[in-house]
Image (spheres, rainbow, N blue to C red):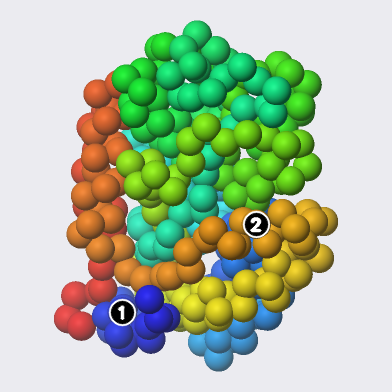
Amino acid sequence: MLALSAAAWGLVPSARAQSAPPREVRIGFQKGSALLLLVRKQQVIEKRLKALGVSSVKWVEFQFGPPMLEALGAGVIDLGSVGDTPPVFAQAGGSQLVYAAATPSAQHAVLVPKDSPVRSVADLRGRKVAFGKGSSAHNVTVKALATAGLKLDDITPVYLSPADATAAFNGGNIDAWVVWDPYYAIAQERYGARVIADTSDKRLASASYYMAGKEFAARQPALLSATLDEIGKLTVWSGQHRDELAALAAEATGIDVRSWSAAFGRAEFSFGPVTDAHVAQQQQLADTFQALGIIPRKIAVADIVWRAPAGQ
């Protein structure tokens, strides 16, 4: 999907809707988000927003999605990119944020050590499975178990960040690990991890989202649409220059080029508005998690999807 101009998005604000620009726009990113590392390096958002009166862009790093959305809900950052599950937890917790754009999720996998006796998801019954609580891996875990007729109660969930899960996986303290690229690729390349399920199975697939602070989206729609437009342009470029992106990501993160190349080789690069299909997919996730008691209440995903200001 080609990047869209602000006008094509239908996001150009009226003069009434636009507040004076802030001195600084704050963007959250994850170390594994090579696309945003590229956006940061190219300074395209800084250049675009400077013309709109913004003096600087501050980049804030997070290890994974849930802490980023905590910061977003608290007003510490204005925009960030996460997988499908953190927004559901955040909305259920009352965080003031909105869905601003959608992009395909990084590939995920259910991994086991190379010498593990586990050969299928069904073999995970009664075993320790690590994933980030409230992360996109949480949803992949639930979906993967369902394909084998299992539920979370049939395993022992171990809630770990990617860094902690890496140590636990290599130390033999967990039986399986559900995680996304590039950690998925690193586990394969460095540790010989074996895949027993991954998101090439469309039953497990999902999307990722750019989430914005509700107040920022309401007060600064021109800044938000301009920022998304620049991200969209580089998303398209990245899909056409995967080797260059891998080299840049390796330099920026210290993760080897081979792992990044493996991750980008199976990645999909597209970008656009949040569609009715995205909303339906997110609502199904939310309803499933509410029925399982993973989130405390029913939510309506459509209530927090960003739309163009009235009168456009």
Q: Quadrant of the N terminus?
A: bottom left
Q: Is residue 215 above or below residue 149?
A: below
Name the residue carrying label 2: 262
Would you call the spot at circle 2 few (<14 residues within 10 Å), some (14-19), or many (20 or more)?
some
Residue occupying the point 45% across, 30% down: 141
Residue at x 42%, y 63% (from the top left corner):
103
Give the class, few, some or many, for how many residues have Cα within 10 Å of label 1's Cα (few <14, many ≥20): some
- Expressed as whole percent of the image width and height from the top left, the position of residue 166 reads 72, 32
How many marks are shown on the rendered structure? 2
Q: Is residue 39 above or below residue 163?
A: below
Q: Is residue 288 left or right of residue 67?
A: left
Position of 82 compared to 167: left or right?
left
| Amino acid type, residue under disc 2 in the picture | Ala
Rendered image quadrant of residue 203: top left
> Would you name the residue on which mark 1 appears?
9
The quarter of the picture where residue 257 lies is: bottom right
Kind of residue at badge 1: Trp
What kind of element bears circle 2? helix
Q: CA distance from mark 2 to mark 1?
A: 32 Å
Q: Is residue 71 visible?
A: no
Which image quadrant for residue 212? Answer: bottom left
